[in-house]
Image (tube, grey):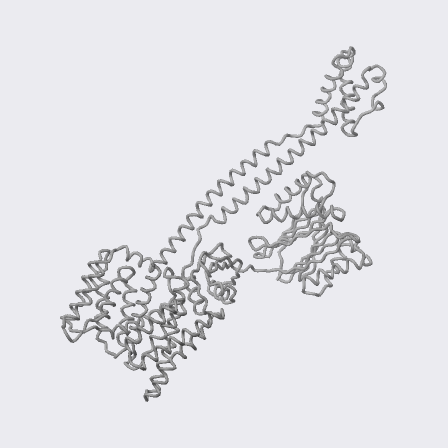
Amino acid sequence: MKFKFSYLIKFVLFSLLFFVLSRANIAGVISPFAFPMLFALAWANQKVWILAPAYLVGYIANFHSFEGIIIAIVTITALIVPYYVHVATKTTMKKWELFVYSLVSQTAFIIFSILNDGNIIYMLSSLVVSEVFLFLSLFVFEPLVVRGLAYRLSNLELICAGMVLMSFSDGLLMCDIYGFSIFKLFVSFLLLTISYTSNVGLTMVVASIISVGSLLPSNNPIFVAPIMLWALAISACRSENKIYSAIGIILAEALSTFYFNLYYSTYFLNYIPVAISAVIFIAIPKKWFKEISNIFSSTSNRMAVKNVVNRNRDLLQRRLNNLSEVFFDMNHVFKNMIKKSMTTDEIQDMLYSEVKNSVCKNCPEQGHCHRTFNDDTRKLFKELIMIALQRGKVTLLDFPSYLSSRCGKISQLINEINTLSNQYKSYSELVGNIDTSKLLISDQLEGVSGIMKTLANEIGTSISFDGTRETRIKEELSSNNIICTDAVVYEKDARTTMACLVVRKEDVNKLKLQEVTSKICGNKMVAYDVVPTESMGLMNVNLKTAPRFDCIFGLACHTKGLNTISGDCHSIERLDGDKFMFAICDGMGNGEKAGQKSETAVALIENFYKAGFDNEIILSSVNRLLNLEKDDIFSTLDICTIDLKSGIADFVKMGAASTFVRGRDGCQIIESDALPIGIVDEAKALTKKIVLNENDFIVLASDGVCDSFASDSEMKDYVLTIKSANPQEFADAILEKALANNNGYAVDDMTCIVVKIF
């Protein structure tokens, strides 16, 4: 029932609108406003089955002759038929088709104009003006339907809205009821409302637009001066108390009627419309006007939202800093829990005491051995313990003849020393693994602390929003037929501008989005993320300053012999902050087991880099994790990360083959003598930074490729001979040459990545 009532309300309002616009005219001979409004409202998703009868009622109420009825019927038919054809065929009506249908709708008007010896010039002028009015109406209704009233119209959209208001004022001027001016009633109430809910500037602008509209029908300026006097009086008396504005407009109307005699008459009905509007204005509750005020204060509301964003960023920064300190303190706790390794002397003394207590305690020769010859016995036992620790066991042959000839517990000594040394080695290995695990956890805690500190620094500065550029972007996109319901532009840092645009789904991939944003932001902007909004059909397009460089890459691989699984593993990942990571991990040996080892290493490295850990912690953690496996399969590691903003490449190598960087001045070789990853706990990587230039090539290769050349110098010379600018062809050429050097046979798994900077 509620919906039916709302449809009835819409029908009544549309009927009144079409009635008013059908009376609007220019110079009394051109009436081009009613039917364009019909088509504009249909385009703005208003229900055609309500619009059509409303137009019929509104138009025929003015022109109820035979010709008027036929013109109205033909007009709505030209809307209804194409509309339902598009619905039935499930095709979208294009805007240019709407203009064609609107012209076709005036077929009856054109025929009657010709038959009645109508002025052809007036008829053509009416059609031209109607198409212009349709264009202006679309400019107003289309964004309002998509964005709603909560968003500010662009300057061009405001101008179009002013033209629509002007035409409506024109029609109202022709709607007097026995001398009672509906026009004055509407205008005076509208000015009172705008003044109370908005500002003086908008009040004066609206008054000026309506004044011009009152001139259109007959070029009579009778209402221009009174309207401007109303606006001035309302603005001067503007206050939180509505009664002052009401008194102001009543006094202004009294001056216009009785003192200045602007209406050429003091007829009392001239005065009543303004008085009625003032009474209605006072009677309406303030909370209703507050709702209207929210429409005009959308900019300030958005500023409040932006202030909330900055406050939340500040709060988040403090919490991240506190969390960072917590993880940093936990890192110290874990490091302090690591047991210090015993020296060799301490180990020997400890095991000597154990042997002495367990074997020699009840021996009748104890006093002779451990008192009379204490130093010699102690030294001999410690030497035997060291032999057991190093060799795994002691035998009778390790005992001197003087001891074996007089000691009756040689067998017990041998068994006890071997047992204790094996137990200690097992214990030592267990403690070592526990300490390694503690160090690993400590590294992770330190890494998490560093990431949180970095995040805190990133959001530590308040975002500086740029309202001017936001408005310009929305207006220029609108002029390119891209409806942008909202735009946020801010500086992330000195080199990065960020923009978030809310546009229709069909506009997401339009090149004008990036072109307009780039022009207004003053640097090249690229879209990096598109996500749906809560509103149906609208998408968030996130753009940011394009990095100074970009890169393309090629990859070429070959397994050893007849193996189907390579021991090499590679990774190519785009990281946050406009960075790229390229990595090759070569598992010692080849085949499935080596491949699994290298895949494990690469997967760990990828995830650590994505999480934001720095190089040292990544390599230390991965090295310790792989070292815990104790499987004697190790991996070389070759990593290159490229910062596309600065053009700086970071190289990290652990036992990897040489890397080649070919630039305009030749080819640079980056060598590594570091141990592979997973051999020892404290393996140190080779790290190097290089500043890249445009058209530089980086060649990362596994040892299967590099070892196929006689030397790094030979491979460097070959890299310099390759003429192709395509990195894929570049990588293929290197692999083909490496295979050719071995008569087409791969002596090891081969992987080659070539990166080109531009």
How far across and how far down the image is residue 416, in percent?
A: 76, 21
Residue, x 36% and y 77% (percent of image)? 73
In the picture, residue 711 is in which quadrant? bottom right
Relative depth, front residue between 478 and 148: 148
Q: Quadrant of the N terminus?
A: bottom left
From the viewer's perspective, tell me whether residue 202 is left or right of residue 276.
right
Residue, x 78% and y 24% (percent of image)? 384
From the viewer's perspective, tell me whether residue 657 is left or right of residue 17.
right
The answer to whether residue 318 is seen in the rendering is yes
Residue extending farthest bottom? 117
In the picture, residue 705 is in which quadrant? bottom right
From the viewer's perspective, tell me whether residue 188 is left or right of residue 433.
left
Residue extending farthest front? 1
How far across and how far down the image is residue 637, in percent?
A: 69, 48
In the picture, residue 11 is in which quadrant? bottom left
Relative depth, front residue between 276 and 45: 45
How far across and how far down the image is residue 468, in percent?
A: 41, 61
Q: Quadrant of the C terminus?
A: bottom right
The answer to whether residue 156 is seen in the rendering is no
How far across and how far down the image is residue 237, in percent?
A: 21, 60
From the viewer's perspective, tell me whether residue 712 is left or right of residue 215.
right
* Position of 62 relative to 473 (above/below): below
Residue, x 29% and y 56% (percent of image)? 290
